[in-house]
Image: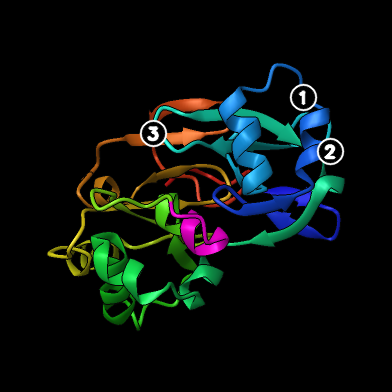
Amino acid sequence: MFLLEAAYVRTHDLLEVDSERFLSLHASVPEWAAEGLRRVPFLVVRRGLALERSIPVGVRGPERNQRWAAFCEPGLVKSITTPPQLLKRSLPAFRADSLPAFGALSLLKDRWTDFDRPWGPGGSVGFELATGNHVAKPESDLDIVIYADEPIATDEAKSLCALASGLPAAVDIRVETRTCGFSLKEYASRGVAPILLRTPGGVRLGSVSWMEGGESE
């Protein structure tokens, strides 16, 4: 979680920025990244350590291997869009009908009606919903982000995974606490074994810590 003036941003949030000012502050920007930002001036908040109050961000390219990591000054941000806010966004029918990942999201919203934690789409589906830029593909997975500041019981995790099965596209559900991110599926099936945790300092095996400075479970 990073402080942005009077608001907080979290991993997977989308920041609309002043692209020209942003690019002017960064040397050696890949050509594809500069071109993409001028067309679609949105950055994805990535996991990382803040640098002098700057926010760690990433630029998405049209190909999966085109990802560029950088930092963004808070003063360049025009708006913040969170994954939960994207649940209320809709696409033109021709996109929604032709891409399995969007069909999967529509079905998941119906199946998770009683789930009361903040959640929403990330990845290419989230980026397209936020920007209108056609980045999702027929083979795209549906990436889901759950923000959980309080523990998720193992039984609840198993139930959520079961409800996310059998959808038109593969679903990858990522849980984000204040200290780390991890796979909901791995968490649900872990037993007493440690799981893969994604932290600002890197990837490690361990138990989940739900609150900043709290004990691991």
Give the numbered dot on residue 139. none
Q: How would you classify the magenta stretch by its main secondary structure?
A: helix
- The residue labelled by disc 2 is 21
**Residue 6 quadrant:** bottom right
**Looking at the image, residue 209 lies above or below residue 203:** below
How far from the left and from the top, in percent, is residue 185?
25, 50
How far from the left and from the top, in percent, is residue 12?
54, 50
Residue 206 appears left or right of 171:
right
Magenta-drawn segment: 127-134
- Dot 2 crowding, Cα within 10 Å, few <14, some 14–19, many 20+: few
Residue 206 belongs to magenta span: no
Q: How far, Cα to Cα, is label 2 from label 1?
A: 9 Å
Please tell me which residue is depicted at 21% across the width and 58% down the height of the picture.
169
- SS for callout 3: loop
- SS for callout 2: helix
Sequence-wise first label, 3 or 1: 1
Nearest the eye: 97 or 57: 97
- The residue labelled by disc 3 is 64
Sequence-wise first label, 2 or 3: 2
How far from the left and from the top, in percent, is residue 72?
75, 38
Residue 41 appears left or right of 186:
right
The type of colouring in the image is rainbow
How far from the left and from the top, in percent, is residue 107?
26, 75
Nearest the eye: 164 or 41: 41
Residue 133 belongs to magenta span: yes
Whether residue 147 is visible to the viewer of this picture, yes or no, is no
Residue 7 appears left or right of 201:
right
Nearest the eye: 116 or 56: 56
